[in-house]
């Protein structure tokens, strides 16, 4: 039976990770290590200046006072680590599409699995809410079952976004690319009850690139979006332009 390390960024008590655990335990041996609090937006951050403390909860899950990346690192590369075949992260309670993946702790946990040479899956709901986690759980469980017969290559990361609806209303699956958002709205300026200046992040930007082959469009049209991700951030198409620019400066 496949061995899965399951984590998330919404925290060990979030309903999404419990729904995903219930779905995956039917098809795999699942171990859960997740942050002790909500770490949304943590991206690939590591806890370098404080000790990490692991706590086993009554339900068998492990809670860590660290980031999603810390959780996967500890679960795959420490004296506490087990042999793992696959890292799964989620279910996030809102989408991780387009530019979201740069900030997402959900995606970062999956990426850390990739850094350890493992295939990994990040899964998010295509709408914000807690009503249809079972839909996403069934989608991921079906993919995991397929992987047993036809394994993903090592270091593959799949970013999955599931429409916010019941399983029977899913129209199918599309392999997509990341779309792109407009820049986020201006930060909100306010003061706390003591008169001190504070700032809050404003709403995320609307879609700037939602072409037919993007994750945004697939989910909007009722399809599961699966986007393969790479950690190689080299802008290869700009290498020749940069070389010409440097030559012109001499």
Image (spheres, rainbow, N blue to C red):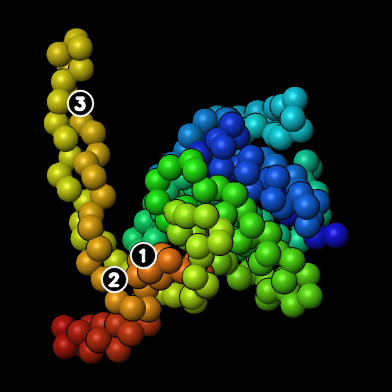
Mark 3 = which residue? Answer: 198
List x then y, in percent, for residue 33.
Answer: 67, 40
Element type at marker 1?
helix
Q: Is residue 47 above or below residue 195?
A: below
The residue positioned farthest toward the right in the image shown: 1
* Residue situated in front as seen by the camera: 52 or 38: 38
Image quadrant holding the N terminus, namely bottom right
Please tell me which residue is depicted at 24% across the width and 39% down the height of the picture: 201
Nearest to the eye among marks 2 and 3: give it. 2
Q: Are marks 2 and 1 in contact (CB under 8 Å)?
A: yes
Q: CA distance from mark 2 to mark 3?
A: 34 Å
Q: Is residue 19 above or below residue 199?
A: below
Q: CA distance from mark 1 to mark 3?
A: 35 Å
List x then y, in percent, for residue 208.
Answer: 22, 67
* Residue situated in front as seen by the camera: 30 or 77: 30
Element type at marker 3?
strand
Mark 1 = which residue? Answer: 220
The residue positioned farthest toward the top in the image shown: 194
Give me the disc on residue 210.
2
Horizontally, residue 199 falls left or right of residue 100, namely: left
Crowding near pointer 1: few (<14 within 10 Å), some, many (20+)?
A: some
Image quadrant holding the C terminus, namely bottom left
Horizontally, residue 182 falls left or right of residue 32, namely: left
Please tell me which residue is depicted at 65% across the width and 32% down the height of the picture: 63
Please tell me which residue is depicted at 79% across the width and 75% down the height of the picture: 149
Q: CA distance from mark 2 to mark 1?
A: 10 Å
């Amino acid at each position: 039976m496949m061995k899965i390390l399951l984590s998330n960024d919404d925290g060990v008590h979030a309903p999404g990770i419990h729904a995903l655990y219930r779905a995956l335990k039917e098809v795999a041996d699942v171990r859960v290590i997740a942050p002790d609090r909500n770490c949304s937006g943590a991206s690939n951050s590591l806890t370098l200046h404080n000790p990490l403390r692991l706590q086993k909860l009554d339900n068998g899950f492990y809670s860590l006072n660290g980031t999603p990346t810390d959780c996967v690192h500890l679960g795959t590369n420490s004296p506490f680590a087990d042999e793992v075949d696959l890292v799964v992260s989620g279910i996030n309670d809102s989408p991780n599409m387009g530019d979201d993946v740069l900030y997402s702790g959900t995606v970062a946990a999956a990426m850390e699995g990739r850094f350890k040479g493992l295939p990994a899956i990040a899964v998010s709901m295509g709408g914000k809410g807690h009503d249809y986690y079972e839909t996403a759980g069934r989608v991921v469980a079906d993919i995991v079952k397929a992987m047993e017969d036809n394994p993903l290559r090592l270091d593959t990361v799949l970013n999955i976004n599931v429409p916010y609806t019941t399983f029977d209303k899913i129209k199918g699956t599309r392999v997509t690319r990341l779309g792109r958002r407009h820049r986020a709205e201006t930060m909100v300026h306010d003061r706390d009850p003591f008169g001190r200046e504070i700032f809050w992040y404003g709403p995320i930007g609307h879609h700037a690139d939602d072409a037919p082959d993007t994750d945004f469009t697939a989910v909007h049209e009722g399809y599961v979006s699966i986007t393969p991700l790479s950690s190689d951030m080299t802008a290869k198409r700009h290498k020749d332009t940069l070389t010409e620019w440097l030559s012109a400066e001499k």
